[in-house]
Amino acid sequence: MRKRQKQPQEVVAPNSEEGGPSIDAIFQRNEVRDTFRMSFLANRLVLPVYDEIKRVHGLCRGEYLLLFCLSYIDELTAQDVAEVTGRPRNSISRAVHRMLDEGYLTRSADPADGRQVLLRITPKGQRLHIEIIPMFVTQQSAILSCLSAAERSQLDQLLSKLVLGASQ
Amino acid sequence: MRKRQKQPQEVVAPNSEEGGPSIDAIFQRNEVRDTFRMSFLANRLVLPVYDEIKRVHGLCRGEYLLLFCLSYIDELTAQDVAEVTGRPRNSISRAVHRMLDEGYLTRSADPADGRQVLLRITPKGQRLHIEIIPMFVTQQSAILSCLSAAERSQLDQLLSKLVLGASQ
DNA sequence: CGAAACTTGTTCCAAATGGAACAATATGTC
DNA sequence: GACATATTGTTCCATTTGGAACAAGTTTCG
C-alpha cells in the first residue's frame, strides 16, 4: 500500500519502500542526475529552515536573505542585494520596507548618488540573525553527517570550484 | 562605480569586480557555506531553464516537474508526485488539470482504490519532455565544465551518498 | 456491521513572487 | 548647457504558491 510519510523536499527523493513506484528511477536513470540531486539537496538544506523562520519569526525567504546579506557585509544598496541574491528589485524593495518597519534595518541616503539608499543591519537585526543561523547549521550538519571528514573536504573544494566557475 | 550585470541566481554570488562590496565575504566567511553554495548552484542549474521553459512552452515549474516525473515512471498518482516532488498536493492538482487540458497527460480511475487517479504521460507529453531535457543537459554541462573528469566522478559519488542519506 | 480515523484529490483564500511601467537621479555626448 | 540614455527604487498587476478546510472513498477495530 502507498503509505509513505510526506517529506518536505524538491524534485525527487529516492524511495526504497516497497509498494510505491520505484522512484529511484528518476534519480538514477536520467540525463541530468547532478542537476536534480543538487536541487533536491539544496531544498532539503534550506526549505525546512525557511519554514521554521516563517513560523517562529514571521519572515519570508526574501526578507531573511536580506538580513543574511547585511549580516556579512556592512553596507549594501537594494540593488546590491538584488544582484547578490538574484531576486528582482521589487521583491527586495518590499523586503526592505518590511524589515525597516520591524527595526531590523536602517536606511540612509547615499550622499554620492541621490538614487541610491544605503542599508545597514541594526543590533536587533544582528540578534535575529544570530538566533536564526544555528538552525541552518543544524540542518547542514544533519545532511552532511553521512560524509567522512575527507569527503566533506572534497565536497568543500568541489563546491568552491563550481561556484567560482558558475559566477563568471 | 556599481556597474555589475544582473545575474539570475539565488542567495549569493562571489563578486570579484572592483567597486562593489566584497561579496565573497558572504560565501567564504559564513557558518553555512555549504548550504548556501549548494543553493546557489542549484539555482544556477535550474532557474534559467525554468524561465526558458515558461517562455517557450508556457509551463511553470510545477507543471514541468510533473511531466519530468511521469517521463521516468510509467504510472503515478497525484499523491505520489506530491511526495516525490515535495510540493503540496493542491499544487499538483492544479498542474494535473492544466497538463490534462494541454493533452500532455491522461488520467484513469484506479480500480483498486476509488480515491486515487492514475496519471500517465501521453506521446505528446513525451515529445515535450524530449524537447526540454537538452536545455537541462546544456546548462549542467556548462556549470560542470570547470571540473575534471575525476572531479566530476567525485561529485557524482558525493551527491549519491548525500541524497541517499538525506532521504531517509 | 458500524463508528472513528485516515487518505486522496479538490476548492478556497491569503501570501509570495516576478514582469512592466514609472519618477527621480546620473551619466554620456554633442 | 541640453538632450538622449542608463540606473535606482517604487508601485501596479497578474501569476504562482501553499495552508486549511472539505467531500468522497478506504481502513481499522470494537
Image (tube, coloured by chain):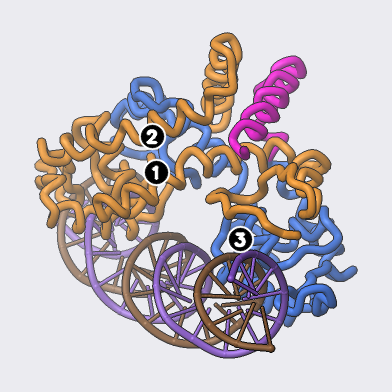
Chain colours: A blue, B orange, C purple, D brown
Quadrant hosting residue A27: top left
Residue under numbered circle 2: B136
Find the magenta span and give its range: A140-168
> Which chain letter matches label 3?
A
Of residues A8 and A79, the one nearer the viewer is A79
Residue A125: give x, y in percent of width and height: 82, 67
Is residue A150 in the magenta section? yes
> From this viewpoint, which residue is outermost toward the right?
A123
| Vertical placement of residue B19 versus A107, above or below | above
Left-right relation of A120 to C27: right
- State the mark number for residue A61: 3
Identified by mark 3, the residue type is: Arg
Question: For the residues marked 3 and 2, what is the alpha-carbon distance in whole angstroms?
Answer: 26 Å
> Which chain letter matches label 1?
B
| Vertical placement of residue B91 versus A163, above or below | below
- In contact (CB < 8 Å): disc 2 and disc 1: yes
- In contact (CB < 8 Å): disc 3 and disc 1: no
